[in-house]
Amino acid sequence: MTSLKNKVALITGASQGIGESIALNLSAHGCSVALVARNEARLAEVAKKCEIAGAANVMTISADLTDLENLESIVTQTVEKLGKLNILINNAGVYQGGNISECNILKWDNAIDLNFKSIVHLTHHASKEIKKTNDGGVINISSIAGKITYKGGALYCSTKHALTGFSGSIYDDLRENNIKVCTIYPGFVNTEMGREDHLDETKMIQPEDIAKTVEFVLSFPNTGCPTEITIRPQQNSRKG
Ligand SMILES: NC(=O)c1ccc[n+]([C@@H]2O[C@H](COP(=O)([O-])OP(=O)(O)OC[C@H]3O[C@@H](n4cnc5c(N)ncnc54)[C@H](OP(=O)(O)O)[C@@H]3O)[C@@H](O)[C@H]2O)c1
């Protein structure tokens, strides 16, 4: 994809954090954006910011992505309103920590639905439309937890590791259709999910850094595809 201008991007988890930053940056490069999350009021605020940033067109879709029945209609609504679909940003996700024998297994199941199953279903529907453009991208936001394992990380790490297998395989499924597929693995990012008392926010990775990475991947020459990018904080962000 040599230019982002007039491309149509669907961004999940766009009501705040990393998804909001990605939406704003794609808007600034002239994309039309479809913003998906549950919170309608926050989506409307981000939509206004995207218009000001320069988006060709903006729409919001309030939906719970764990309701897998919703997902085909998200793609249909986007194409009906914005004319086509070039780019899918699978960003929405939740952190769920805990010990395997003591966890709330229903909460874990719900997190699996959001962090993995919704991505599989949404990409299934979206990829059919993206293929039609012969100029697109699917970006999956993973985490350092998709590269490592740790105590208390069974749920989060496994959903992010699963994304690696999914993403690598669909790269092969979609490459001949001129669709870039990339997994991004950030460390702690300065968002509601990533902020912790012991971390210095100014030294954390910023959501705008992830947005720049997405821009880099999508704007990469048509002859290459960065398939995996890990982002670590430049400086140690632990206080003290
Ligand atoms: N922050 C970090 O340190 C960090 C590090 C590495 C990777 N990541 C990954 O980056 C992605 C974005 O994280 P973030 O830090 O931006 O988190 P965030 O600030 O908590 O934002 C999460 C987004 O997902 C949406 N969302 C949550 N549950 C949803 C559901 N059931 N249906 C639809 N949308 C839902 C939220 O919107 P609503 O509440 O409006 O639905 C929100 O827009 C996640 O996949 C996360 O795993 C984050």
Image (cartoon, helix red, strand yellow):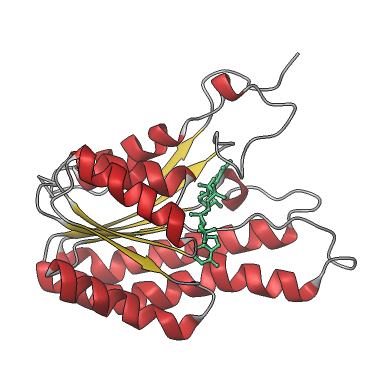
Classify 229 as above or below 63.
Answer: above
Classify 45 as above or below 204.
Answer: below
Q: Tell me the quarter of the image containing the C terminus.
A: top right
Q: Residue at x 36, y 72 (%)?
A: 123
Q: Position of residue 221 (x, y in %)?
A: 14, 43
Q: Position of residue 226 (x, y in %)?
A: 30, 46
Q: Quadrant of residue 178?
A: bottom left
Taking the view exactly as shown, the residue that stands out farthest to the top is 240
Q: Position of residue 99 (x, y in %)?
A: 85, 60
Q: Viewed as shown, does residue 144 lie left or right of 22?
A: right
Q: Residue at x 48, y 81 (%)?
A: 68
Q: Position of residue 180 (x, y in %)?
A: 25, 56
Taking the view exactly as shown, the residue that stands out farthest to the front is 41
Q: Quadrant of residue 110?
A: bottom right
Taking the view exactly as shown, the residue that stands out farthest to the bottom is 69
Q: Viewed as shown, does residue 114 lie left or right of 81?
A: right
Q: Nearer the viewer, residue 145 or 48?
A: 48
Classify 223 as above or below 207.
Answer: below
Q: Is residue 14 visible?
A: no
Q: Residue at x 45, y 72 (%)?
A: 63
Q: Is residue 89 visible?
A: yes
Q: Residue at x 10, y 47 (%)?
A: 5
Q: Nearer the viewer, residue 106 or 24?
A: 24
Q: Nearer the viewer, residue 124 or 64?
A: 64
